[in-house]
Image (tube, rainbow, N blue to C red):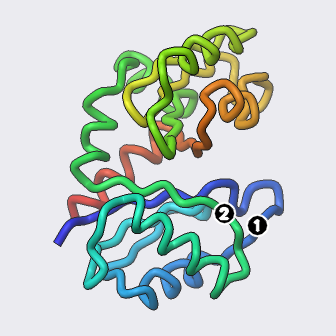
Amino acid sequence: MTTHVALLRGINVGGNKKVAMADLRDLAGGLGLTDVRTLLQTGNLVFGGGKRGGDGAALERLLEAGARAKLSLDTQFFVRTAAEWERVIEQNPFGVEAKRDPGHLVVWCLKAAPGAAQVRALQAAITGREVARVVGREAYLVYPDGIGSSRLTAAVLDRALGVRGTGRNWNTVVKLAALTRD
């Protein structure tokens, strides 16, 4: 059975889209997913495919529809297999930053890989000291002056890349990888 990581976009942030992690685990279990675990309060799931199996896109649709129906929650899910999550770590172009300042290194998981024009648009959208690299369906972002004060926001990323995403800092990325190995 394949283990998956699922990230929810924009829940429990600033009082918006509140959802209890126990409810999220119950939702996933009720959808036939197995060994469901959550990490932190920001919508991070690790689970086995159970009877559902399927590819990431199918699991995303299943979870999104289930969240709407069972939790009245309209949000997006971003699913990666455990092997894909390991590649997220292996392909990180900012190894020094990952060790030195993991809280300011963010992996922005995308629904689809952006094209070259969108990657150029992202580079052009950076107005501060942030640095970005895109590898497949992930954008790696370094926020040396902090995320909260940056103008490289979710809206800017969505617009530049032409595809929606959600981000997790490097500490969370590593913790999720450890959960996939348990």
Task: First in sequence, mark 1 or 2: give its number.
Answer: 1
Q: Which picture quadrant has residue 100? A: top left
Please give the name of the residue rendered at 73% of the width and 31% of the height, measured from the top-left corner. 153
The correct choice, above or below, for 66 with respect to 57 in the image is below
Q: Quadrant of residue 144?
A: top right
Asked which quadrant contains residue 33, the reply is bottom left
Left or right: 43 in relation to 95: right
In the image, what residue occupies the spot 71% across and 14% down?
125
Nearest to viewer (mark 1 / mark 2) = 2
Whether residue 53 sits left or right of residue 67 in the image: it is left
Number of other residues with Cα within 10 Å of mark 2, as a class: few under 14, some 14 to 19, many 20 or more: some
Residue named by callout 1: 17
Image position of 19 (left or right of 15): left
Q: CA distance from mark 1 to mark 2?
A: 8 Å
Residue sitting at 51 percent across and 73 percent down?
Answer: 63
Question: In what quadrant of the picture does the N terminus appear?
Answer: bottom left
Type of amino acid at the residue the image marks with label 1: Lys
Task: Determine which residue is flagged by label 2.
Answer: 75
Mark 2 residue type: Thr
Q: Position of residue 15 (x, y in %)?
A: 83, 62
Determine the residue located farthest toward the bottom in the rendered image: 30
Q: Who's the residue at 52% across and 28% down the image?
A: 105
Label 2 SS:
loop
Percent across and percent down for residue 54 are: 29, 69
Q: Determine whether 77 is above or below 71 in the image.
A: above
The x, y position of residue 176, in whole percent, is 38, 54
CB under 8 Å between callouts 1 and 2? yes
Disc 1 on helix, strand or loop?
loop
Task: Give the quadrant of the C terminus.
Answer: bottom left
Q: Residues within 10 Å of mark 1 (few under 14, many from 20)?
A: some
